[in-house]
Image (tube, rainbow, N blue to C red):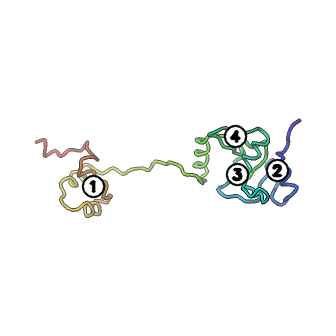
Amino acid sequence: MRVTQAPIIQYLMEKNPHLFVRDGNCLLWQGSFPDNRPQYWDSDLKRNFRLHKLVWQQIHGSVPAGHFVHPKCGDPRCLSIAHLHLITTRERNINAHRNRRTPWKLKISKTRAVLPADVVRSIMHDDRSTSEIALEKGTNRDTVRKIKNGTAYRHITNFFVNL
């Protein structure tokens, strides 16, 4: 026997039919939707249920560690069994970044500006405070401090020392 809908969805559709809208093959949730995830508050149990996960558990069993239930159609409101599949954390982060939808933290590397060698050399020889130098050179105090301590831009040497 093929299951067409999870028992929780059948129950919710009978109890609150206004919470669902059919859009082609999708069954779209119209209820609570924090963090781009359909959720349902059960007043008897006094707790929130994430519907994607609950539907998956009722049909397929538990969700393996490191995986998330995600609708293939791309609409986060979709609760259709045919559209739900498992993805890894990495796939989830890539999808969120691609769709510009990031409810969770993504580690995105920042681009770093590189100071020209002549500016680094002038910072090495400047006796003023790091704040004054940073303001003049358009960088931050930490970078100036690291240049002066020799922990940043070590590849740039003072050519006067080698003469």
Left or right: 151 with respect to 31?
A: left
Q: How far apart are labels 3 and 2 at the CA level?
A: 16 Å
Q: For numbered disc 3, what is the local secondary structure?
A: loop
> Which residue position holds label 1?
144
Q: How far apart are labels 3 and 4 at the CA level?
A: 18 Å
Q: Position of residue 52 (x, y in %)?
A: 73, 48
Q: Hey, what amino acid is under mark 1?
A: Val
Q: Nearer the viewer, mark 1 or mark 2?
A: 2
Left or right: 157 with respect to 56?
A: left
**Mark 2 nearby-residue class (10 Å; few <14, some 14–19, many ≥20):** many
Identify the residue at image location x=20%, y=44%. Answer: 157
Q: Position of residue 21 (x, y in %)?
A: 81, 56
> Which residue position holds label 4?
63
Q: Nearer the viewer, mark 3 or mark 4?
A: 4
Identify the residue at image location x=86%, y=58%. Answer: 15
| 137 up-or-down from 93: above or below | below
Q: Are marks 3 and 2 in contact (CB under 8 Å)?
A: no
Q: Hey, what amino acid is under mark 4?
A: Val
